[in-house]
Image: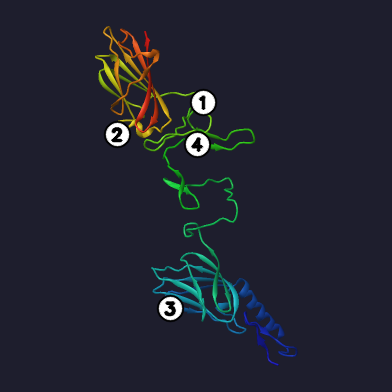
Amino acid sequence: MASSYSTDLKLELMVTGENSGTWGDKTNTNLNLVQQAVAGFEAIDCASSNVTLAMTNGTISNARNAVLKLTGTLAGTRVVTCPDGIEKTYIVQDATTRSGNTLTFKTASGTGVTLVEGKTHIIYVDGTNAIDVFFLKDVVEDTTPQLGGNLDTNSNNIIIDDDHHIIDENSNEQLTFQTTGSAVNNTQLTNAATGNAPDIAAIGGDTNVDLKLTPKGTGRITFNGGGKIQQTAEKVTTSATAATGTINYDVITQAVLNYTSDAAANFTVNLRGDGSTALNAIMDTGESITVAFIVKNGSTPYYNNAFQIDGSSVTPEWQGGAAPSAGNASSLDVYSYTVIKTGDATFTALASQTQFA
C-alpha cells in the first residue's frame, strides 16, 4: 500500500514495509513540516495581486506556516486565500499600506476576515471558513472595549483629555474633567470604614487650598440631610457709595452689602437675583434667604423707607412691631432682611434696623 497524506498538514503517512531505507529521510521531512506548522514564518507581498496560499503534500508550503506577515502597498482590493479542507490556526500580521483599499484573509470557497491595517489577527480555519478568533488591537480602534474583571492600574495613572467624561451605561455623561496647564492643586476622594464619613478634600502644592463648588447659572448647591459647619465666611461687597434712590441688592453675588459713604437721602432696597435674574427664579416655595445691608450715616441721617422684591413693593414685618422712621446720626445702620417664599412671586419679609456707633 502506498503512503497517504494527513488532511490538515499534508504529512506523509507511511505504512509498514514501505520506503525501506528511506524512513529516516521521510521522517525528518515530516518533522520539518511540523516545525513549519508550529513555528514557521513567512512574509508575503500583497502589493500587486491577490495571493493564493498552497498546502502541498510532503513539501514546504506557505499555507503551512504558523505566522504570516502580509506586506506591500496595495494597488487595489486584495484577497489572501488559503486552501479549503484543512483545519489550522494562523497568526496574521497586516503590515501593508492600504491607500484606502481592503485586505481579506479567507478560504477558497468560504467566508473570511477583513484585516485591520497595522494590526495582528489570530485566525482559525475550520476547513470551510476563516474565523477571527482574536484581534490584537488597542483601545483607539476598539470603540466599545469591555473588561472581563476589575481594572488594576498597577500603580500607574489614568489620563483623561481636557473636557472629557466618564459616562454611564446609557452613554450619558456622569463626570467631566477639565484640565489646567499649570495645576498644582487637586481634589482627593477618600472612602471610610464603618462609623466614619467619606472625605472630599482639596490637596496640592499650596499650603492652604480652598475647595470650590460651582453650580451652573442660577443653580444652587443642595445639601440633603442634616449639616454641620465648622467654619464659614460670607461674601461682602464693600462700595464707597452713598445710599440714595433705589438700591438693587443682588443676592447671587453677595450676602452683605457695605456702603461706606454717608447716605444722601432716604432709600428703597430692591432684592433680586441679579440684573438678569429674578429672586423668584432662584428660590423655591418654602425657602428663605437672609442678607444684610450696612448704611453709613453722617450728621444728617437717612433710612430705608421702602422695600421691594424683583421691583415689586413688599411691606416687611419689622422687628419691634414698627418700621423705622429715621436713621441714626454718625452711625452705621445695619438692615437685616429675611425673605421667605410662600408661593410664586409671593414673599414674607422680616426686617430689622440695628445701630452701631
Q: Are marks 2 and 1 in contact (CB under 8 Å)?
A: no
The mark nearer the N terminus, 4 or 1, is 4
Callout 4, which amino acid?
A: Thr
Mark 1 or mark 2, which is nearer the start of the sequence? 1
- Can you give x and y, in whole percent of width and height, for residue 275 in the image? 29, 31
Residue type at mark 1: give it.
Ile
In the picture shown, does residue 115 fall above or below 342? below
Quick check: marks 4 and 1 in contact, CB under 8 Å?
no
Give the secondary structure at mark 4.
Answer: strand
Q: Which residue is mark 4?
A: 187
SS of the residue at dot 2? loop
Q: Position of residue 355 (x, y in %)?
A: 37, 10
Label 2 – label 4 distance at C-alpha:
33 Å
Is residue 355 shown left or right of residue 83?
A: left
Q: Quadrant of the C terminus?
A: top left
The spot of residue 7 in percent (x, y) is 63, 82
Closer to the chain start, of discs 3 and 2, is 3
Residue 25 falls in image quadrant: bottom right
Residue lying farthest to the bottom in this orientation = 1
For mark 3, does the 10 Å Cα neighbourhood hold few (<14), some (14 to 19), or many (20 or more) residues? some
| Residue at numbered disc 3 | 49
Give whichever of discs 2 and 4 has the lower sequence position: 4
Residue position for label 2: 276
Please tell me how many numbered marks the rendered image carries: 4
Tell me the tag on residue 271. Answer: none
Q: Which element carries disc 1, helix, strand or loop?
A: loop
Viewer-nearest of discs 3 and 4? 4
| Crowdedness near tag 2: few (<14), some (14–19) or many (≥20) residues, C-alpha within 10 Å | few
Residue drawn at x 49%, y 50% as measured from the top left: 168
Disc 1 target residue: 229
Say which amino acid is labelled 2: Ser
